[in-house]
Amino acid sequence: MSVPAFSDISKASNDLLSKDFYHLSAQAVEIKSNTPNNVAFKVTGKSTHEGATSGLLEAKFSDKPSGISFRRFTMSSDFRPSLSPIIDFMVDVSPDYAQLLMFYRRAGLTLTQSWNTVNALDTKLELNDTITKGLKLELLGNFLPATSAYGGKVNLHFKQANFHGRAFFDLLKGPTATVDAVIGQDGFLAGGSAGYDVQKAAITGYSAAIGYAAPQYTASVTATNNLSVFSAAYYHKVNSQVEAGSKATWNSKAGSSVGLEVAAKYRLDTLSFAKAKINDRGIAAVAYNVLLRPGVQLGIGASFDTQKLDQANHKIGTSLTFDA
């Protein structure tokens, strides 16, 4: 198994406990479409239980790397090769002729642009495996036309067989930097994260985590907020139909109580699944997802306060996803 990023050490259990619970929004709609020239469009809209609505329009263009191709030219005195995108060349000269070997490469990039209902324009440019194998560079820009505020960030991701490191730089605020790294061997994982404010010349926060990942289960212990908030997570894929997971959290500065949450997922058939979870405060949630037809998914969810069933603290939500 590959080494995850620091924030993904507990990803399996976190996804089971948080994803596909549709009561968080009263209604949600997502429309996705792909064009033949590798442009993906996504439109999302959400309505909260308080009546507020939000939306996002996103366009993503992906130009995958083509690798390196070679062209060999045998040149005489009157030969002039056409020089298109060349990254390197080599000339072999003999008394009668010369050979020019050209190296071509399309680096490959992903460009994502989005516009949301708070009138924020976001742009992200990704270059993957271009500088060196395993290195991804991200350039992010943000602009608010109403206030002329803007931001700029640079992210670096470096991944090898037993190592996964990341660095996030906010160039205009601070500037600040957040660096994290995870090393892994035979399923065992250990990682740490630290933030640094360049202007203040001070460490702004640090975290640590250890874990173990196997094909059927994962377990991890994470300490965040300057090692003051501890969480232990466990995920188990029981079989092809059943998944189960739990998470316990303790804040050493807030008191001695421990928060606990457990969840399970059951795949009813190839087209549908159901999920349920409950926490130590008695808040329970259930969800059902079904593929109505190819490209159309319906999700229905609800949450209940089991200790106050006679009060109007319950929530119901629906989600509809179109994928063309």
Image: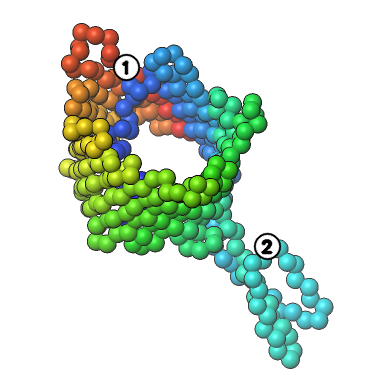
Q: Residue at x 41, y 18 (%)?
A: 48
What amino acid is at disc 1? Ile
Q: How is the model colour-coded? A: rainbow
Q: Which residue is mark 1?
A: 316
Q: Name the quadrant containing residue 59.
A: top right
Q: Residue at x 28, y 25 (%)?
A: 287
Work out whether residue 3 or residue 180 is closer to the camera in this orientation and state it. Answer: 180
Above or below — where is 3 with respect to 114? below
Marked residue nearer the N-terminal end (1 or 2): 2
Q: How many marks?
A: 2
In which quadrant is the N terminus drawn? bottom left
Left or right of 97, for residue 227: left
Give SS at disc 1.
strand
Where does residue 208 sit, x and y in percent of width and height?
Answer: 31, 50
The one nearer the camera, 101 or 305, is: 305
Element assignment for label 2: loop
Q: Residue furthest bottom?
A: 95
For residue 176, above or below residue 117: below
Which residue is pictured at 18% across the width and 17% down the height? 306
Placement of 116 over or under 86, stated as above or below: above
Residue 19 x %, y %: 33, 33
Q: Amino acid at mark 2?
A: Pro
Badge 1 density bin: few <14, some 14–19, many ≥20, Cα 10 Å: some
Q: Are marks 1 and 2 in contact (CB under 8 Å)?
A: no
- Residue tagged by mark 2? 85
Instruction: In the displayed orientation, state which residue is furthest to the right.
Output: 78
Instruction: Specify few, some or many for label 2: CA neighbours under 10 Å numbering under 14, 14-19, or 20 or more.
Output: few
Q: CA distance from mark 1 to mark 2?
A: 56 Å
Q: Residue 304 falls in which quadrant of the image?
A: top left
| Residue 257 in view | yes
Front residue of 255/163: it is 255
Q: Position of residue 142 (x, y in %)?
A: 58, 37
